[in-house]
Image (cartoon, grey):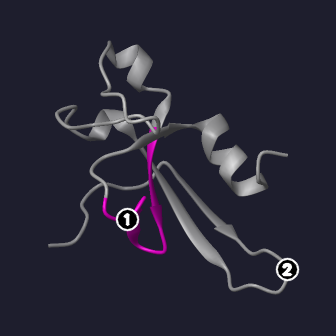
Amino acid sequence: MSESRKPKVTLRVRFQGKKAVKIDLFPASEFPKSGALRPDGEPITGTKAKTSRLFRMRVNGRWFPVGMKKVFYTRQQVMDMLLGGA
């Protein structure tokens, strides 16, 4: 079954000398909260306003990080990963 949700943001990133990577960001509000985690492993709790600033990331068609259940990131955390914390 294919993904029915549409990403809010799609990025295509290519670092020098490497293949391009497609990154899709989906709002946390489109996913059930049960089992959802922050990157530090803490469960997500709170109001819709708090979760509206969180995103689930799909890289090249696979949920990130591979092998973990729903992990959500802030925009800043996504930018830090892309830019290496610079």
| Mark 2: amino acid | Gln
Point out the residue furthest to the front here: 41
58 above or below 41? below
Residue 72, image x and y in percent? Answer: 42, 40
27 above or below 69? above
* Pointer 2 residue: 16
SS for dot 2: loop
Q: Which residue does the image show at 44% across and 54% down from the upper left?
A: 7
SS for dot 1: loop
| Mark 1: amino acid | Val
Q: Which mark is residue 66?
A: 1
Left/right placement of residue 51 relative to residue 86 reads left
Residue 17, image x and y in percent? Answer: 82, 86
Q: Which residue does the image show at 46% across and 35% down from the upper left?
A: 40
The stretch drawn in magenta includes residue 14: no
Q: Which residue does the image show at 62% across and 40% down from the upper left?
A: 77
**Magenta-highlighted residues:** 55-67
Residue 24, image x and y in percent? Answer: 50, 59
69 above or below 17? above
29 above or below 13? above
Residue count near mark 1 (Cα–Cα under 10 Å), binned few <14, some 14–19, many ≥20? few
Residue 84, image x and y in percent? Answer: 76, 53
Report which quarter residue 10 is drawn in: bottom right
The secondary structure making up most of the magenta span is strand
Query: Where is the N terminus found, in terms of image quarters?
Result: bottom left
